[in-house]
Image (cartoon, rainbow, N blue to C red):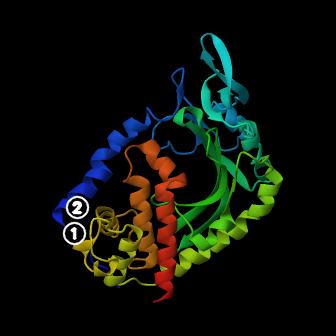
Amino acid sequence: MQIKCILGVYNLLVLWYNIHINAKQRNLQMAHEVEMINGVAQMAYAGDLPWHGLGTEVSNDLTPQQMMSKAGLDWTVNKVDAFVEVNGERIPTGQSALLRSSDNKVLTNVGENWNPVQNETAFEFFSEYVMAGDMEMHTAGSLRGGQNVWALAKIKESFDVFGEDTVEAFMLFSNPHQYGKSVDVRFTPVRVVCANTLEWSLGAQAERSIRIGHRAVFDGDAVKDTLGIASEKFAKYKEMATFLGSRKASADDLISFYNGVFPNTSRKEEKATVKTYDDLSRNAKLCYDALETQPGAMFAEGSWWQALNSVTYITDHVQGRNAENRLHSQWFGYNQTRKVKAAEKAVEMANAV
């Protein structure tokens, strides 16, 4: 069934402006969000130039340690006691400060039992996979002034959803040097045609990601045992994607789906009264409008796979104050939870067809 979008002139203009006119502005903003030290962006990439246009281009055969060095991340964090000065006297605060070895910058204040994970430990996590030929280092960088160091490795697995709609597999390691944030290791599928970072339903979340708080000692081998074999996890995502691509979504279903992901909180009526496009929230309308205009819209047309990817496209490429916030949000924040919710909702509604 081909699903027709009812587009208001205003929302068409908003969508077009966000995608085309604002693209250059967003890229310029990102140039100030990637951490810069002595005029050098703390990021390295293999392959195509990233969306922000910064970083050091490297070959795709680097070891994790070489990638860390090329990205300017070969520094350590040192935990030191924090003091305040009162009348010239240094008084302990009971907390510690994390200092970056390269410039003694204070990254965060932490408690006594907070155990930092060094960047070298984070990158070493990939060594076994890279040496075995199962992965290759793809991108690494530092955001928020060094508070979030991350590395992305490409898993040598991919599949096509109904022809040429290719999905590739990656593994993301986020190593935050920030109080209240946990180490996060996860499998991350990426849809090639639009660079959407895809999410799984909530039921599958525990199977493809793990978080370790800084009160525990990081054990890379234990994390690998918990995550299991990458190809097995990716096969499960393929099952979900193929299933969604085989199920058709009606116009009424789409209204319910988009409202479930982005409820119209400005309406005092119950959700059940949201029955038409005009009743949807602004974000839900953006997703509906992108249904047939998103990159790759022709693949599995009219299916729940198409509907899910319209949400992912808007969250990854349109929403957000700037590119850094958008990147954080799509991986770790509000939009990441929106995408999980969208995947869960899509699977639920596709099962009811």
Q: Give the CA distance from mark 2 to mark 1.
A: 6 Å
Which residue, given by chain and number where applicable, does mark 2 sit on?
12
Which residue is pictured at 63% across the width and 30% down the height? 72
As drawn, the residue found furthest toward the left would be: 9
- Amino acid residing under circle 1: Leu
Q: Which residue is drawn at the image coordinates 60% and 11% (left, top)? A: 87
Q: Are marks 2 and 1 in contact (CB under 8 Å)?
A: yes
Tag on residue 7?
A: 1
Q: Nearer the viewer, residue 39 or 157?
A: 39
The secondary structure type at the circle numbered 1 is loop
Residue 196 in sight here:
no
Front-most of residues 140 and 148: 148
The residue lying at 42 percent from left, 73 percent from top is 306
Where 307 sits versus 330, above or below?
below
Q: Quadrant of the C terminus?
A: bottom left
Q: How many marks?
A: 2
**Which quadrant would residue 234 be assigned to in this image?**
bottom right
Residue 130 picture location, percent across and down: 76, 49
| Res 4 → quadrant | bottom left
Q: Is residue 337 above or below residue 47?
A: below
Q: Amino acid at mark 2?
A: Leu
Question: What residue is shown at x 76% (from left), y 41% (from top)?
Answer: 121
- Label 2: few (<14), some (14–19) or many (≥20) C-alpha neighbours in 10 Å: some
Where is residue 5? Give x, y as percent: 26, 74
Quarter of the image where the N terminus is located: bottom left
- Looking at the picture, tell me which residue is in the foreground, 64 or 257: 257
Is residue 302 visible in this depiction of the protein?
yes
Query: Is 163 placed left or right of 137 in the picture?
Result: left
| Above-or-below relation of 294 to 95 | below
